[in-house]
Image (cartoon, grey):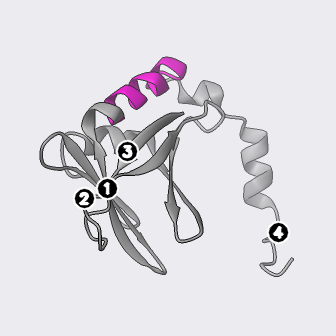
Amino acid sequence: MRAVRVRFPESPSPDLEVDALLRYASQDPFAVCLTFPFDDGFVERYFCRGLLEIGRHQEAGLGDVTIAPGKSGTVIVRLHGAHGSTSVVVPTDDLGAFLADAYALVPVGAEHLHLDLDTVLVRLLAPPRRKDA
């Protein structure tokens, strides 16, 4: 886990820095999580660790998450969802340090050694949970 200071360039206060968290767990070796405050709570967005790596150097991603190098040592993470879109600007150095920590836990190519396929299959095959439950 790494605390980072991010900005939201499309917000009413585009230069205001906000505390956010980048998380990685070896139990979910292909994913990273970005958590940031929103309204009275927090938003958590999960996406591919490899996408974050590629997006530091060139535009990457399709659909809900796209990542691209920004200006002045930043990376722009664009998040699209059913309720709208936002861009999050993260310092490149912070992303690099976060990824170095993640690769120290699980090197590229060793992800399959950390997957609990039985648990993944149980989740995939479980009946859908009701939203009102």
The residue type indicated by label 3 comes to Arg
Task: Indicate yes or no whether the magenta region holds residue 36.
Answer: no
Q: Nearer the viewer, mark 3 or mark 4?
A: 3
Q: Is residue 43 above or below residue 110?
A: below
Q: Residue furthest right?
A: 133
Is residue 50 toward the left or the right of residue 67 in the image?
right
Whether residue 76 is visible to the viewer of this picture, yes or no, is: yes
Badge 3 crowding class, 10 Å Cα cut-off, few under 14, some 14 to 19, many 20 or more, is some
122, 35: nearer the viewer: 35
- Quadrant housing the C terminus: bottom right
**Which comes sooner in the sequence, label 4 or label 2?**
2
**Which comes sooner in the sequence, label 3 or label 4?**
3
Q: Which residue is mark 1?
A: 7
The residue type indicated by label 1 comes to Arg
**Which comes sooner in the sequence, label 1 or label 4?**
1
The picture places residue 89, in percent across and down from the top left corner, at 29, 53
How far apart are the two marked residues, 4 and 2, measured between alpha carbons? 44 Å
Q: Are marks 4 and 2 in contact (CB under 8 Å)?
A: no
Q: Nearer the viewer, mark 2 or mark 1?
A: 2
Q: Which residue is mark 2?
A: 15
Which residue is located at x 37 percent, y 26 percent?
97
Secondary-structure class at tag 2: loop
The residue type indicated by label 2 comes to Asp
Question: Which range is magenta?
Answer: 95-108
How far apart are the two marked residues, 3 and 4, measured between alpha carbons? 39 Å
Q: Main secondary structure of the magenta part?
A: helix
Which residue is located at x 53 percent, y 23 percent?
106
Q: Which residue is mark 3?
A: 5
Q: Which residue is mark 4?
A: 127
How far apart are the two marked residues, 3 and 2, measured between alpha carbons? 11 Å
